[in-house]
Amino acid sequence: MNVVAHEEQTNIFEIETDAKTPRSWRSALIGRPLATADAPHQTIGKMVGLAVFASDALSSTAYATQEILMVLAIAGAGAFKYSIPIAIAITVLMLIVTISYEQTIHAYPGGGGAYIVARDNLGELPAQAAGAALLTDYILTVAVSVSSGVAQITSAFPALYEYRVWIAVCLVAFVMLINLRGVKESGVTFAIPTYFFVATMFITVGVGLFRYLTGSLGAVVNPPELEMHAGEALAAVTPFLLLHAFANGTAALTGIEAISNGITAFKEPRSRNAGITLIWMSSILGTLFLSITILANRIQAVPSETETVISQLARTIYGGQNIFYLAIIAGTALILVLAANTAFADFPRLGALQAGDGYLPRQLTYRGSRLVYSNGIVLLAFIACLLIVLFQASVSRLIPLYAIGVFLSFTLSQAGMARRWWKSGHLQPGLEVKEPGSVLKHDRNWTFKMVVNGFGAVCTVIVMGVFGMTKFTEGAWIIVFILPVLVTIFFLIHRHYKNLARQLSLDTQLAPLAIQRNRVILLVSGLHQGSLAALHYAKRLSHDITAVHVSIEPTEAEKLEKKWQIYGEGHRLVILQSPYRLMIEPLLEYLAYVEAHKKENEIITIIVPTFVPESGMANLLHMRTAQTLQKVLRRKENLVIIEVPYQVH
């Protein structure tokens, strides 16, 4: 132990300790504790960063095309040809959003994404709306991606279909456990499966496009039946149907914002590394999404809950369920499960930011033994598992809940960036303004950047409106309802913390009145070594001591009276008769009487002797009177409850 005194004030000391948590099953699961000084060494590079933050976006290639076809199937298989122009429109939107977030990464190197951008440029209400949207999005990312990964597994092994919910829950628990071990370790662990998926998917679409161009790619053999409105095809494809399909396909954009939220996880230079990773991710995502959609049309794939489009594509390209088919299914299932890792990387960070601003419980700012926000990780896993169970791990039932929050955060982020460029353009060259999330400087290209972000905001708000309109009755109404409720809860939490801060402030709080008298009440259930130890402690606090016993059995009260005359040292003993065998209620009545007759500037101290056995299980054999009193009396002023432990070996 090293003790260091401050030079300016010799009554202030800093003590360095080497205290570490003892070895336990918990440390065996998540690893040895890391020192705070190790934080800079836990950052990641671009290659690992792509695995950590891009798995969500890349995984959407596994189901985005299928979700487009699910809607078009209402008009019959002949409508599937519209999926290609829809996919092109979604890719253009993806490019716009990518450019916007690339600017955000360089403007806000401290991370935080849409939440920080909205807070600094649009105000607290839009910021909390962005926070609610992103937190909801991350929860749904875990539920949707893991459910979709399980769907890939059950496509290859149909016998597992009835166990899909529990398989999904176990996979969420596994990803949670890995993330509790730290960002760097989870990134390294999941990097190999992520790159395995990228490699196998590019090989698959490469082979598929080659066979398509050479005319050797046929149609899918034994496709699943067209489940949605089979035999009831519409007379024509309507604009509403196309908008509906477009809205479903925008699931491909989910996860693009993840890198801007987690910039602090990257090695220096953070913004440059994060920006390059974002461009890599969007390039891979756009290429795979368009290729899969084109090939799905060529092989005449049919959207189905029993066999995914990726499964049909792989067995058509590779000529059956061979080793190559199993490789692509394994890679797709892995990336879908690992997509949850993106949410586990970003949800705790965003929760900590909002909690630091006082809009979420402060416990979310706590960094665990592995330098990650452990409480946020566990909370995310719990809520996601709840959704998986409630929606029976169905991707199609979860998707309608998904994209509204995503596009709300896109819109607020881009609107906030447009506002930031406007402020930047009106600053004098050389002048800097310090904002909570960044430093604002004059930018000579502010007009162009403002137009880009403004146009992006218009596009994403239109998509959000389309999604809300087309998917409202399918479950999107739940998110439309939940988001305002969450924002209201955030502001109620913030009001509580503000009121607490105002009451505890040293600047505004009046100095407490001096205590002139301390009246001590010693609770005794019987007279023994523990109660005598508590009596000796009470004598250190005050000369005004009253022992109080609640009498349930008269014979026990008589024994106590006799012993008190010998060992009570002349202090008062009050016996409260309890004919109805109540313990707390008579005591509360007596305390109310004492409080009503106490003098000004008098404090009441209640002392409770407590046995502390060696075995933790033995605590279950004793009454926890002190804890019960604290729960009942904690709102009363000028009243203190002290627990005096007595060790029992």
Image (spheres, rainbow, N blue to C red):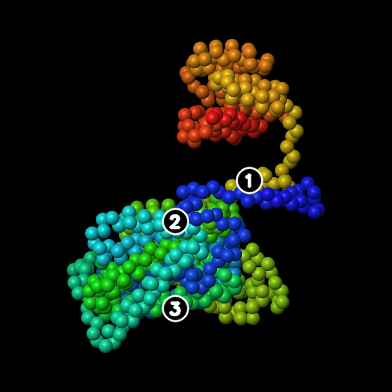
**Which of 307 and 612 lies nearest the eye of the viewer?**
612
Look at 53% across and 60% down and name the residue there. Answer: 349
Q: Is residue 479 above or below residue 253?
A: above
Q: Amino acid at mark 3?
A: Ser
Give the label on residue 328, or none.
Answer: none
Please state the horizontal and vertical placement of residue 239, each as a whole percent of the image.
33, 74
Residue displayed at 65% across by 50% down = 17
Q: Tell me: 544 left or right of 447.
A: right
How many numbered tags mark residues here?
3
Density class for disc 2 (Cα within 10 Å; few <14, some 14-19, many ≥20) is: some
Which amino acid type corresponds to the residue marked 1 in the rendered image? Answer: Leu
Q: Is residue 539 left or right of residue 326?
A: right
Residue, disc 3: 283
Disc 2 target residue: 177
Q: Identify the residue position indicated by label 1 in the image.
A: 500
Q: Is residue 370 above or below residue 94?
A: above
Give the image quarter of residue 541: top right
Instruction: Specify which label sits upstream in the sequence, 2 or 1.
Output: 2
Q: Quadrant of residue 330?
A: bottom left
Picture coordinates of residue 646 (x, y %)?
Answer: 58, 29
Give the secondary structure at mark 1.
helix
Quadrant containing the C terminus is top right
Percent of width and height locating residue 224 = 21, 68
Q: Gap in Å between the C-alphas at discs 3 and 2?
A: 31 Å
In the rendered image, is residue 560 in sight? yes
**Which secondary structure, mark 3?**
helix
CA gap between label 3 and label 1 equals 49 Å
Query: Toward which corner of the image does residue 226 lie, by quadrant?
Result: bottom left
Q: Which residue lies at the image location 49% right of the left edge and 52% below the top edge? A: 27
Q: Residue at horizontal 52%, vertical 55%?
A: 32
Q: Amino acid at mark 2?
A: Leu
